Image (cartoon, rainbow, N blue to C red):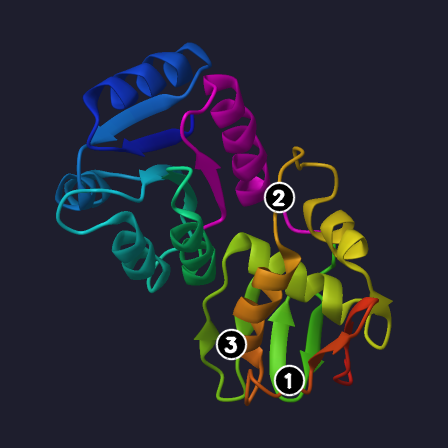
């Protein structure tokens, strides 16, 4: 049973989502702020956060930043309609998705199911294959990336899927639709997920200078291409 943490300072929102998601078979724990969430995380495994941006004290963006430094936990931000810039910042910091208030519980459920499927998705049957480029090693079966110094680079589930799509298609121009198909592979629901933001996040990991990328290059009007030589 997957465990979902609903982190929101509004008790009605917390209890409404708890009742709905528990009715769909999930275990749900509640927190009103970042401090309570930290206590929940210390006590046991949580698979996914429904995280309000506007929290008292440490806000949802700060929580996202801190978690992404140490964890690949699924994060869906809950935002207000006027929080467009915060949504963009949240995605840049590593949130997997966002949903805007007011929302339908069915939409929360659809987004939650989609993200949990991707988090739990088994690795491709690769027979232990490792893809190498410019000293980097991408372990497709173990879902790990090691830098040229042998250190493990932390990737979110979406970032790993995007890099895997690139290294398995070197030298090929991939449109945004191609990349959505290769990374989500039918597990998505119709909503705006920006490949461009994922590419920017991934460039910060694998590019010597993300502002002047040499591995994941933009092909204007067409999409992206992975230019590194892959072994």
Task: Assign a secondary structure to mark 2.
Answer: loop
Q: x, y percentage for residue 125? A: 74, 52
> Which sits earlier in the primary sequence, circle 1 or circle 3?
3
In reply to whether residue 80 is colored magenta, the answer given is no
**CA gap, disc 1 to disc 2?**
25 Å
Residue ID at (73%, 59%): 127
The one of 120 and 141 positioned closer to us in this rendering: 120
Q: x, y percentage for residue 4? A: 36, 31
Residue 32 seen in the figure? yes
How many marks are shown on the rendered structure?
A: 3
| Crowd tier of the residue under label 2, counting other residues whose Cα lies within 10 Å: few below 14, some 14–19, many 20 or above | few
- In the rendered image, the quadrant that contains the N terminus is top left
In reply to whether residue 102 is colored magenta, the answer given is yes
Residue ID at (18%, 45%): 34
For the record, the magenta segment spans 95-124
> Which sits earlier in the primary sequence, circle 2 or circle 3?
2
Picture disc at residue 204: 3
The correct choice, above or below, for 161 with respect to 12 in the image is below
Q: Quadrant of residue 224?
A: bottom right
Residue ID at (14%, 39%): 36
């Amino acid at each position: 049973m997957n465990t979902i943490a609903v982190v929101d300072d509004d008790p009605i929102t917390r209890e409404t989502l708890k009742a709905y998601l528990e009715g769909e078979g999930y275990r749900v724990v509640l927190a009103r702020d970042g401090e309570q969430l930290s206590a929940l995380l210390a006590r046991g495994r949580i698979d996914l956060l429904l995280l309000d941006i506007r929290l008292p004290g440490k806000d949802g963006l700060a929580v996202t930043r801190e978690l992404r430094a140490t964890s690949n936990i699924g994060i869906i931000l809950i935002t207000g309609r006027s929080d467009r810039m915060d949504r963009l910042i949240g995605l840049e910091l590593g949130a997997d998705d966002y949903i805007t208030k007011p929302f339908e519980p069915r939409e929360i459920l659809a987004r939650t199911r989609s993200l949990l499927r991707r988090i739990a998705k088994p690795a491709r049957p690769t027979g232990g294959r490792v893809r190498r480029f410019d000293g980097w090693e991408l372990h497709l079966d173990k879902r790990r990336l090691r830098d040229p110094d042998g250190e493990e680079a932390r990737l979110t589930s979406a970032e790993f899927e995007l890099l895997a799509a690139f290294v398995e298609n070197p030298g090929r121009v991939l449109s945004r639709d191609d990349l959505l198909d290769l990374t989500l592979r039918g597990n998505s629901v119709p909503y705006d997920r920006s490949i461009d933001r994922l590419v920017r996040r991934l460039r910060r990991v694998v590019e010597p200078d993300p502002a002047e990328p040499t591995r994941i290059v933009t092909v204007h009007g067409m999409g992206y291409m992975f230019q590194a030589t892959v072994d």
